[in-house]
Amino acid sequence: MTADCLFCRIVAGEIPATKVHEDDVVLAIRDINPQAPTHVLLMPRQHVASAADLSEADTPLLGRLFSAAADLARSEGLDGGWRLVVNVGPDGGQTVDHLHLHLLGGRRMHWPPG
Ligand code: 5GP
Ligand code: ZN
């Protein structure tokens, strides 16, 4: 737990969030400012600042995050497809420095992203 980290505080239950999945490794919550009909944030319970800090030792963690995303896409009924986004650093548009996957779906996505 990193005391000044927003998502660590959500994991710890200090800040409320709408949880859609929780297990021993992963927490998934609805984004407070959704960019699509489904917009879920999947994060590890443990603090990892960004994807730039990942190493091969994090392979199991990433497997859990991705499989939880696929399970949620199914339970959200995103049968036509969906998108996972990981913003990294200021140029990548990252605003919360705790690793998270954006699961977006329920509308047609565009490419290239902004
Ligand atoms: P990033 O910009 O770091 O990739 O994504 C951070 C996301 O967290 C944004 O989509 C933003 O709307 C969301 N967010 C910021 N503060 C909160 C909050 O307090 N609760 C929830 N549920 N989402 C938040
Ligand atoms: Zn954190």
Image (cartoon, rainbow, N blue to C red):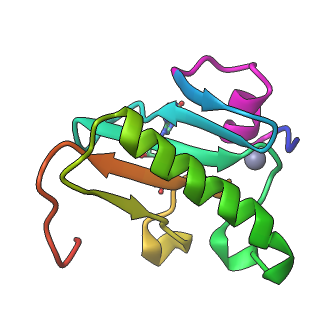
Q: Position of residue 92 (x, y in %)?
A: 45, 73
Say which residue appears at 75% left-offset and 20% top-offset.
Answer: 13
Q: Residue 71's x, y, as percent?
A: 49, 44
Q: Nearer the viewer, residue 63 or 52?
A: 63
What residue sits 11% from the left and 55% below the top? 108
User: Magenta region, mostly helix, strand or loop?
Assistant: loop
In the rendered image, the vertical position of residue 66 relative to residue 75, given as above or below: below
Of residue 6 and residue 46, the one placed in the foreground of this image is 46
Question: Within the magenta stretch, is there residue 41?
Answer: no
Q: Nearer the viewer, residue 86 or 81?
A: 81
Residue 68 falls left or right of residue 15: left
- Residue 106 x/y as whole percent: 19, 42
Residue range of the region highlighted in magenta in the rendering:
4-18
Is residue 100 among what the camera can see? Answer: no
Query: Horizontal placement of 26 versus 101: left or right?
Result: right
User: Magenta stretch containing residue 5, yes or no?
Assistant: yes
Report which quarter residue 50 is drawn in. bottom right
Residue 18, position in %: x, y?
51, 20
Q: For the point 74% across and 34% down, which residue is it?
A: 23
Looking at the rendered image, the quarter that the N terminus falls into is top right
Q: Nearer the viewer, residue 27 or 79?
A: 79
Q: Quadrant of the C terminus?
A: bottom left
